Amino acid sequence: MSNSLYFLRHAETKIELSIPVREWSITNEGILLTRELAKSDQLSAIDGIIHSSEPKARQTAEIFAEGLDIQMYQISGFDELSREHEGKLTNEEYRDRVRRTLTNLEENVIGWESGADALKRFEDAVKKIDIMFHQKNILIVTHGIVLILYFSKLKGLLSIAFERWSQLEFLAWGLVRDGCVLVDIV
């Protein structure tokens, strides 16, 4: 790796139970907080922005791109763990599925992509970024579960991935260079 990869969890999402979670957008508060973060010095000197194919990640990325003359790319490898299920899950049911996914990476929770498959897809997307860019600062806007899988693996903390996910906030960010975590996501 020759790039500095800034990974950012998308802004707070508007929960709309009538549509699939992958189609949700960000809240007005999420927009405001993203604008504040974009204006801060925390994630400055960005040379390119990558986002997942989900609207909440694209919207967050677009706010960062406002007023900058930089390229934006969509890479579906940075999409959230695929989660299809019928009906509404309670918060407890959702947390249980996330826990099962993060504690047994090979398990396919009914209707969900396995943690192992999501992590492999995410790592392949990171490799693609390193081919696309050379010695650049790249902002990658993505999602909570896949971020925790990736950072937990890099830090050797997969055994506590669920606990790390439980601490993750919207707009949390981390920095990876040469496969080493310089700033942790949690």
Image (cartoon, grey):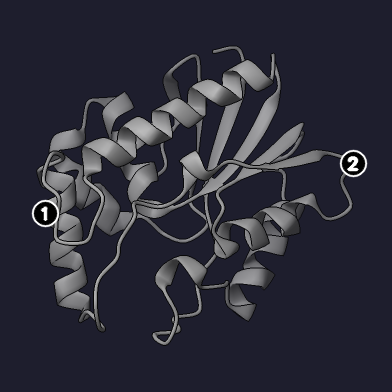
Seen in the picture, residue 31 relative to 83 is either above or below; the reply is: below
Residue 67 image position (x, y, % from top left): 89, 52
- Give me the residue at 20% from left, 58% from top: 98
Residue 130 image position (x, y, % from top left): 59, 19
Using the image as rendered, state which of residue 111 and residue 105 is in the foreground: 111
Seen in the picture, residue 129 relative to 41 is either above or below; the reply is: above
Seen in the picture, residue 87 relative to 171 is either above or below; the reply is: below
Circle 1 Cα neighbour tier, 10 Å, few/some/many (<14 / 14–19 / ≥20): some
Q: Is residue 180 left or right of residue 57?
A: left
Residue 90 image position (x, y, % from top left): 20, 81
* CB-based contact (under 8 Å), mark 2 and mark 1: no
- Residue 103 picture quarter: top left
- Residue 87 picture quarter: bottom left
Q: Which residue is mark 2?
A: 69
Q: Amino acid at mark 2?
A: Asp
Q: Which residue is mark 1?
A: 100
Using the image as rendered, state which of residue 128 and residue 157 is in the foreground: 128
- Residue 56 picture quarter: bottom right
Using the image as rendered, state which of residue 102 and residue 85 is in the foreground: 85
Q: Earlier in the sequence, mark 2 or mark 1?
A: 2
- Give me the residue at 64% from left, 79% from top: 28
Q: Is residue 115 left or right of residue 143?
A: left
